[in-house]
Structures are given as structure tokens and as C-alpha cells.
Amino acid sequence: MERRLFTLYIALILCIAGFAFCEGCVGEDAGQQTPAPTATPTYTATPTVEPTNDNTGSFSGAGDQKTTMPLSAGVHMLTLEMEKPDGSEPGASTVSISTENDAIMVEGNYTPEVRPDAIIDGHYHWTYAFMLEEEADATVEVSQLAPWTLHVGVPKMINGIPPQTFTGVGNAATPFFMIPGGNYSCQITGENMTVISVGLMDYNGTMLMDDDRVAPLAFHQLRNEDFELYVGDYATTVPVTIKEGDNYLFNIICDGRWSVTFSPVE
């Protein structure tokens, strides 16, 4: 079986993402639009640490650390919790999880403009959902200078259907929610950011793709005429077709504040 590689980078480098085949098709509107005021259910993506069970594990340390963690097959969610050092900031962090058949690497960071809003009880948190094809003793590596704790569990689920609005600061995996088959509009905004990506994953861990790009929005960076990253705002509306109804979640990679509204097309 070929090794499947998911590599995601954010910070000040060009980001590329690739995944396996999946159902659905999308296309991005060339014009930028600002989402309409939401009268829809809203979920704020504030990560919380769940009690451990048979499908979870924790790993703590500071600096670059590596361990082995037994993980079952299926969809998992990692939560990285970082202490805020006195008089300084923790900087960018990287988590990689690899097995014989799967590998992911995710980097998380915050722009200075949103860092104060990302602190919860003296800690920074970010989350990301990932898929393992089979049960394995996974190699887990964390890179972060400040003291940190990595929790690996399962995503939450909410009893809801579109329209749904999700908001947050920094990387976040939303809960699963039901999306019936049909045509939808996905309104995405980012504030005080340099990069944003929004991926849709079904209950089996399959990513929605547009050709070879993550959908509904592959990595988008803000760059000036000299191709330098800058902090700013971004907005777009993307049409999405869901061919088969299922439970889905959004994986958002962003170093700023973001909002995602997913609504059926009348």
C-alpha cells in the first residue's frame, strides 16, 4: 500500500497540500465577497481538552520531542496546548504523526495582531483533524520551544445541518455536522492573517478535492508585489457540490481570525 502523505505548512513559507480521491466538486468565485450578516447557528472553534479514553493519548514536553503512541484506525483530532512564557511568545509550532502508511505534518502560528485573542487561561490552543488508514503505533513529533501538551482524541459532533457558521482564531477542526447532498455556498473570511486554508473532511476521513487541491479553499497567502507575506484581510465565496450526504467537518489552517459560513443554495 502506498504511503499517503499529508503535509501542511503555515508561517512564512509557500504551502502545498495533497490528498486522496474523494467525492464532490467545487469552483472558486474570482471576486471577493463579504459574508452576509449571520442569522445562522454559530459555533466558535475554542478547543477544549477531552478526558482520555481508549482512543486518545497525551504527550507533554518542551522543545523538540518525539514518542510512540498507539492509535486506532479512523479520524482523530489533535489538540496542541502551549503555555505562554513570561515576557515572550511561544512562536510557531509543528506536529507530525506518521505510521507505515500515513503521515501528516501541521504547523500552527498566530500573527501578533490576534495573539491576545488566542490565549485561553494562559495557554494557546490549536486543533487539526487527521485520518489513519489502520491501527498502528504512530511516531509523534512536536516542535515548540515553550512547554506544551499534545492531546490526540476524536472530533466532536453537533446535531445540525446547514446553514452553519464557524469562527475562530488560528488552526481549528470544527465538529462533525450533517450535510445532505446538494449545492452549497461557502463564505470564507480571514482577518489579520497571512495564510488561510479551509478543507472539508467526511466521516470516513476523505477530503473534498478540486482536482488535486484541497476544497473548498486550498492555501491562500497574502503577498505584496515583492512576493513578501503581509498581514491583512481576505474574503471569498466558493460554490460547493456535495454528491452524497454525510457528516463532515472543516479543517481550517490560519494564523489570524477566520469565519466560515456554509449555506444551501436556494
Image (cartoon, rainbow, N blue to C red):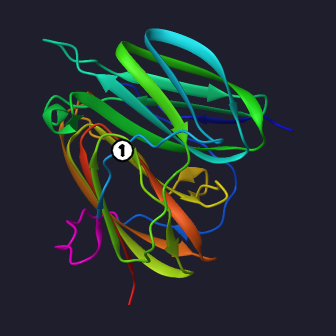
Split into 4 quadrants, where in the image is the N terminus?
Answer: top right
Q: Most extreme residue toward the right, as rendered?
A: 1
Where's residue 69, x and y in %?
66, 25
Magenta segment, prevailing SS (helix, strand or loop): loop
Split into 4 quadrants, where in the image is the C terminus?
Answer: bottom left
Q: Residue at x 73, y 45 (%)?
A: 73
**What amino acid is at disc 1?**
Pro
Is residue 227 at least partly visible in the picture?
Answer: no
Is residue 45 at least partly visible in the picture?
Answer: yes
* Residue at the spot of label 1: 47
* Above-or-below relation of 259 to 58: below
Membership of 192 in magenta stretch: no
Q: Is residue 119 left or right of residue 186?
A: left
Where's residue 261, x and y in %?
32, 67
* Above-or-below relation of 155 to 222: below
Q: Is residue 172 left or right of residue 141?
A: left
Most foreground residue, 39 or 46 = 46
Most foreground residue, 23 or 245 = 245
Q: Secondary structure at mark 1?
A: loop
Where's residue 137, x and y in %?
74, 27
Membership of 33 in magenta stretch: yes
Callout 1 crowding tier (Cα within 10 Å): few <14, some 14–19, many ≥20: many
Where's residue 129, x and y in %?
53, 45
Q: How many marks?
A: 1
- Tell me which corner region of the image, top left, top right, bottom left or bottom right, holds residue 30: bottom left
| Highlighted range, magenta | 30-42
Q: Is residue 68 left or right of residue 247?
A: right
Most foreground residue, 184 or 133 = 133
Q: Residue at x 52, y 11 (%)?
A: 65
Q: Residue at x 51, y 73 (%)?
A: 178
